[in-house]
């Protein structure tokens, strides 16, 4: 009887360990990878067409400070297909590179657990406070999850360091 109980306890502990490892893999590897793939899909589908030397003066001024490794997105085309998109936030030093959404005042947390297409996503999206008005508001509040995996605003604290 003792051998059966010991064997049963070992089997249960082994199952708990396997399940825990699977959950950790899911939360720290699979979900962040899926999120990165979703963002890369957006960037691939809506690449910004930067004119080579022949753009208007306003376009050249906008591009002057752009880091060369930052891929740009055609925001207007993206907004035509996904009207909730208000902008794109990129901080290359910490891996933040996401669309910024905004929902209505009636459902201000719509994107808390949704991707840019409106589908359920545990990571949610970066989103503007519902009452922020681009071009008029002096301060824009952007919400996003601080994921343990480093996704979304998970690595934002690295940006605050002096180095």
Image: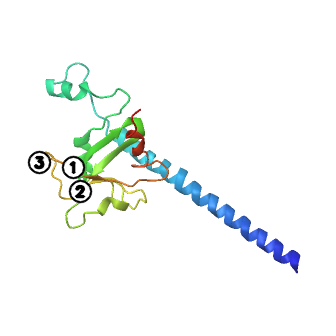
Which x, y percent locates residue 111?
Answer: 32, 59
Work out which residue is located at the far front of the displayed protein and give it: 162
Image point 58% across, 57% down: which residue? 24
**Horizontal arrangement in the rendering, residue 44 relative to residue 24 (left or right):** left
Residue nearer the viewer, 40 or 67: 67
Location of mark 3 (residue): 136
Residue nearer the viewer, 106 or 80: 106
Location of mark 2 (residue): 129
Image point 83% across, 73% down: which residue? 6
Mark 1 vs 2: CB contact within 8 A: yes
- Could you classify mark 1 by the number of other residues whose Cα lies within 10 Å: few (under 14), some (14-19), or many (20 or more)? some
Query: What's the colour scheme?
Result: rainbow
Which x, y percent locates residue 55?
Answer: 19, 23
Q: How far apart are the alpha carbons under marks 2 and 3? A: 14 Å
Where, by quadrant of the figure, is residue 127 drawn? bottom left
Where, by quadrant of the figure, is residue 7 drawn? bottom right
- Could you classify mark 3 by the number of other residues whose Cα lies within 10 Å: few (under 14), some (14-19), or many (20 or more)? few
- Could you classify mark 2 by the number of other residues whose Cα lies within 10 Å: few (under 14), some (14-19), or many (20 or more)? some
Location of mark 1 (residue): 140
Q: How far apart are the alpha carbons under marks 1 and 3? A: 10 Å
Q: Residue 22 carries which label?
A: none
């Amino acid at each position: 009887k003792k051998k059966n109980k010991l064997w049963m306890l070992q089997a249960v502990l082994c199952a708990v360990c396997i399940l825990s490892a699977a959950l950790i893999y899911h939360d720290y590897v699979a979900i962040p990878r899926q999120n990165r793939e979703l963002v890369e899909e957006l960037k691939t589908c809506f690449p910004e067409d930067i004119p080579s030397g022949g753009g208007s003066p306003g376009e050249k001024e906008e591009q002057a400070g752009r880091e060369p490794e930052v891929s740009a997105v055609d925001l207007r085309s993206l907004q035509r297909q996904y009207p909730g998109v208000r902008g794109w936030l990129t901080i290359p030093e910490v891996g933040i590179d996401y669309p910024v959404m905004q929902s209505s005042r009636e459902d201000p947390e719509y994107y808390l657990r949704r991707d840019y297409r409106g589908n359920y996503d545990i990571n949610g999206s970066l989103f503007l406070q519902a009452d922020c008005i681009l071009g008029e508001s002096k301060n824009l509040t952007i919400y996003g999850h601080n994921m343990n995996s480093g996704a979304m605003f998970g690595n934002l604290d690295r940006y605050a360091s002096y180095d």
